[in-house]
Amino acid sequence: MKFIEGRRVLTEGELQANSITRYHVTKFYREQITNSGYYDQLKYIVEPSFEEFESPGNLDTSGEHDNTVVPGLQHKYAQTGLLLVTDRCASYCRYCFRKRIVGKDSDEIAIDFAQIARYVGGHPEMTNVLLSGGDPFVLSTGKLDEILDHLLPIPHLDSIRFGTKAIVYQPKRFEDPALPALFRRIHQAGKVAVIVTHFDHIGEISVDAERNIRSLRAQGVQFLNQSVLLAKVNDEPEILAATFAKCHQMGVRPYYLFQGRPVKGASHFQVPLRRGLEIAHGINQRVSGIQKTFKYIMSHYTGKIEILDLGADGRLYMRYHQNKDPKKIGKIFSRPHREGACWLDDLPEG
């Protein structure tokens, strides 16, 4: 197998033992990053590295297994259902937090959408469903329509979200002439269609992606963006500020900047929390008021934690943006900071 640092001969068993995902990238993305002027940073997103062998961690950092209520459906936060509709992506990100699923024939993928619809229908507190995976846009538009057949009749759902990096890897997918009718169906059912894009770096924003986003926005689709803070890739405030400013220009609202997770085979992408705060503050110093729309988030087992600041008292201040217990949402809490800490579990209690 070819790695950034050179070739290495490996057995299938060694790849599985180290949670090394096979190399898989679209021709479009290879050309995009090669011509972007940022290849030395962007190569780490898709090209395997020897560092993956020395990256400890686990394969379910946010408790997805524990929050699965029906095969393929997670219900961690009251208002949101997370639907895993496929275990495939257009390209495989090296920092993926779902390495246990992606590129494999996973039994965590939704199969019985009628059963899922019964669960959602019985939980009126659930107002939105997020289609994820894998990447829902590797599925045909016909297959996505079949999934919507089960979701759109549910009256208390007010939005359908699609989490995707396909707009980066394969923007031509969004030129499918059948897609406008799919989004029209969502609107006619009285719901909002939201695409959550995944631009990690301004070098990933292609002319094709921008054109297709503008076209879909004209059809009423809303866009949000989430990025992951990645060592060697985008751990500079200038890069992320430029990325978020460009997203705003296209009508895509920066939504989350995720702290990298301690995933086995990918924890070498983590940036220390102190540096992450410097970057988050540095972004806000470089963008206009209306562009300050992202939250710096740690998607922890206990909930989505917004990382706020490092106090003069040496404590890291945080608050729950989302939590299974509604009473904890919005509550500020702190822990003593430990130099080099990258995750809540790296910080001592007290």
Image (cartoon, grey):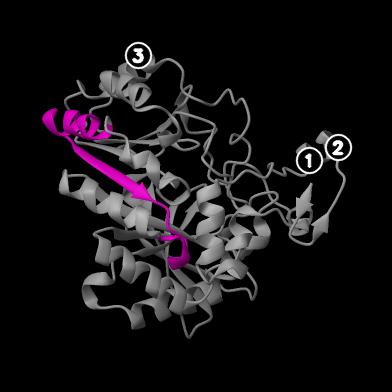
> Marks 3 and 2: CB-CB under 8 Å?
no
Circle 2 residues within 10 Å: few <14, some 14–19, many ≥20: few
The stretch in magenta equals 179-205
In this orientation, which residue lies closer to the viewer: 95 or 276? 95
Distance from the alpha carbon under mark 3 to that under mark 2: 40 Å
State the image coordinates of residue 278 (x, y, percent, origin top left).
48, 79
Circle 1 residues within 10 Å: few <14, some 14–19, many ≥20: some
Q: Residue furthest bottom?
A: 312
Tell whether position 197 is magenta. yes
State the image coordinates of residue 201 (x, y, percent, origin top left).
46, 65
Q: Specify the amino acid type for callout 2.
A: Thr
Q: Is residue 324 visible?
A: no
User: Which residue, given by chain and number where applicable, does mark 3 sit on?
Assistant: 114
Distance from the alpha carbon under mark 1 to that under mark 3: 36 Å
Q: Is residue 296 visible?
A: yes
User: Which residue, given by chain and number where applicable, does mark 2 sit on?
Assistant: 11
User: Which residue, given by chain and number where applicable, does mark 1 sit on?
Assistant: 15
Residue 195's quadrant in the figure? top left
Q: Residue at position x 41%, y 38% from top? A: 76
Tell whether position 60 is magenta. no
* Chain-order first, disc 3 or disc 2: 2
> Marks 2 and 1: CB-CB under 8 Å?
yes
